[in-house]
Amino acid sequence: MKAVTPLLKGLSSLLPSSFKGRLYIMLFVCSFLPLLLIGGLSVYSISSILNNKIDKGLLNHLNQVMINLQKTLDYLDYSSQQFTTNGLIGKDLNQILLTDDLTETMPLQNEMKKNINLLNFTNPTIGLTMFYDKKSKQVLFSNLLTSDLDLERLPTLTRTNGAVYYGPHKTHYKYNDENMVFSISRKFDISGGNPLTSEVIIYTETNFKIFQQILNTTQYGMSAFHLLLDEEGKILYSDNNDLFLTGSMYKEKEQDRFRVFSDTNSHGWTLVLYIDRQAYNMELVRWLVAFFVVIMISVSISIFMAVKILNYVYNPLLNIKKGMVLVASNKMDSELSRSGLDEFDYIIEQFNGMNYKIKELILRVEQQEIRKRETEVAKLMAQINPHFLYNTLNTVQWLARMKGETEIDRFVALFTNVLNYNLTKEGLIVSIREEVEVLKNYIELQKIRYDYLFDVRLTVDEQTWGDRVPRFLLQPIVENSLYHGLRDEGGIIEVTVRRTQDHQLLILVRDNGYGMSEDKIKQLLSGENRSQTGMGIGLSYVDMTIQSNYGSKGRMEIESVQGSGTTVQIIIPLTGEGIHHD
């Protein structure tokens, strides 16, 4: 800095001594400075392009195609598992094959159709699905009319997890057999113990549109085509059969005509992208044309603005300088006189109203911070749509009851109660009795999970049963002790709720666990580990809730000794229904 100061002083001495003369020099510099900046930007941009910036963009597109293709195969794998003997749909076919009574098979067939329609609705990537008996060479069940199935003639993409993936190939849908699809086959009876089902396979195809969406070359913005290779280098699919014949062995060629990019999947198959080199270079030409257009527009605007500034700036600046001196003297109530020029008069009016707006803004910021805390709390409570979870848990509970799994039934019932309490969007203020009851359910859940290796001791003063507090205070603190404090065995958590002598509500949670360092406590209060605490939101949520509802009248304190345990203490005023902001 000391070396730069003399240089600045030297340059300053070369400028005219008058303000107006200096202004001319500054306007001249401002007119040509954008040109210099754009020139520097052009050199950097062209250098970036020469460093394969376009190549990286194409590789990113190609990688996204690979990801979408892998997701499609994963969807096929998941869907086909529903058709096995252990799946939602396959179990019905298994019963159909094992019975000859039509009165029993008809409801099962209807149930299969219903479940297949449900699967297609929830997973629109799935198209044709069939059960095929290789021994009798017959289709046992299919959701669409099919042509003859010959798996040996289909191009094998990969084999993994007991399934064979094919494609791309023409669909086996009888009335639309020109569309290209990916498909999967796997054994219906994985165990193979039943001779009636040991030769039955499951065959599932993707929807017709999926193939077009994944291998759509228009996404690259230039002339291109794809090749799909198996792990031995055989071409399974080609967008350009004139250059690369499907079924032949791949050999890269014509480097002077094309730019070639490739990406190999972990399963061994490779996707190759060929970009026409002329179209590839056209991107550079378009960029250069746009670049020079921007240069011309920028220079024109700079010169125009320089002339306008020269006409308007000199005299009004003297008035503004006077106002700056007043502000520097802390005379915030002083007003500047109008200049008669609309542009500067607007600035002067803004300057005159600045002091009032600053005062108003300070008050507004305080109010916004209060609303922000309330919004954050409400947002945390509304992050999950509970209806889907409730419906899913009710289904699990119903299945447990049907199978006589009483422990699972009780576990799900407890979990549903806790979830209903935690996720409901109404009744943000509850009684201590409600908080304690849901805490008991949560503790029972965790005891089942940890095989009763810890004990929770509740001591609640009867006077506090009706006291009103923000919902969901106790569980995150107990949850923190379970996840970050207790030892493997003999853990004890003591929960105490009582009134203090100065008419405040005291909530105390103490454990005999490992304890925490100051850094760990700060991390938990900042909410950095929120996603790692299972169902809970964390101590940061509790602290935010207390500050939002009680302001400085409520507080949460954490004391921890490593090796001895942790104590969390909450003190809030007894305000009944009238919880307020400070």
Image: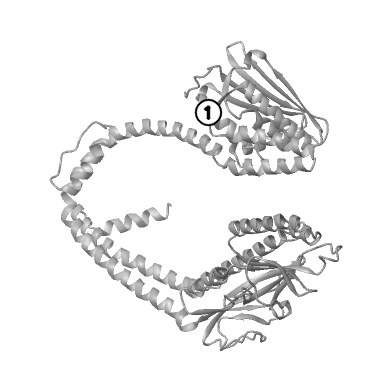
Q: Quadrant of residue 567?
A: top right
| Residue 154, horizontal then vertical, whole percent | 69, 78
Q: Give the residue number, with chain letter if any, for mark 1.
A: 547
Report the front residue among 537 and 168. 168
> Badge 1: how crowded within 10 Å, few (<14), some, or many (20+)?
many
| Count of all numbered marks drawn on residues in the image | 1
> In the displayed image of the protein, which residue is found farthest to the top?
501
Q: Secondary structure at mark 1?
A: helix
Q: Is residue 395 above or below residue 276?
A: above
On the picture, is 428 further left or further right than 557? left
Q: Quadrant of residue 136?
A: bottom right
On the picture, is 103 further left or further right than 343? right
Residue drawn at point x = 66 percent, y = 70 percent: 183
Report the front residue among 502 and 246. 246
Q: Amino acid at mark 1?
A: Gln
Report the front residue among 18 and 486. 486
Residue 381 in view, yes or no: yes
> In the displayed image of the protein, which residue is found farthest to the left?
340
| Residue 8, horizontal then vertical, whole percent | 34, 55
Residue drawn at point x = 76 percent, y = 42 percent: 402
Residue 21 in view, yes or no: no
On the picture, is 48 further left or further right than 530? left
Q: Is residue 460 above or below residue 470?
A: above
| Residue 432, horizontal then vertical, whole percent | 62, 21
| Residue 310, horizontal then vertical, whole percent | 18, 57
